Image (cartoon, rainbow, N blue to C red):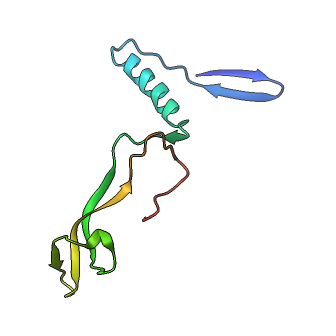
Amino acid sequence: MRTGEHSNLTISYTQLSSDLPSSKAVADGAVIWNCLQTVKARVARYSFGAKTRIPYDANDPSHQGRALIRGPEGLLCVGNIWDPILAKVCGAVLSCASGFPNS
């Protein structure tokens, strides 16, 4: 351990070094981790979501002609509906500070 003094301030530090082959990987990982913390926004390459069902609405044109199923509640539902969590939109950027609307 080395100690340096400057302006009545004592700083103590330990210098570590390694000649192991993994030391470069550790240093590279530290740099990459730091860079990942600076990302402000991401662009989705794919859409993420789940198939679900929604209650049937006879007045909704998109429900017309679709197969109906009876849900466990006894209601008629339109099945095989895609409910996106994150939709891929060309050129759209998702801010890291923003959340998902359905969460």
Q: Residue at x 46, y 28 (%)?
A: 32
Residue placed most toward the observer, 4 or 84: 84
Instruction: Pick the quarter of the image with the C terminus.
Output: bottom left
> Where 17 sits versus 89, above or below?
above
> Where 40 sits versus 54, above or below?
above
Q: Quadrant of residue 73?
A: bottom left
In this rendering, would 55 be left or right of 94?
Answer: left
**What number of labels is visible?**
0
Residue placed most toward the observer, 95 or 14: 95
Q: Residue at x 60, y 25 (%)?
A: 13
Give the x, y percent position of residue 99.
50, 57
In this rendering, would 62 be left or right of 79?
Answer: right
Q: Residue at x 71, y 21 (%)?
A: 4
Give the x, y percent position of residue 101.
47, 62
Q: Quadrant of residue 76?
A: bottom left
Instruction: Pick the quarter of the image with the N terminus.
Output: top right
Give the x, y percent position of residue 70.
16, 81
> Where 94 sits versus 25, above or below?
below
Q: Residue at x 23, y 78 (%)?
A: 77
* Residue that extends furthest to the bottom in the rendered view of this protein: 74
* Residue that extends furthest to the right in the rendered view of this protein: 7
Give the x, y percent position of residue 54.
28, 74
Residue placed most toward the observer, 36 or 87: 87
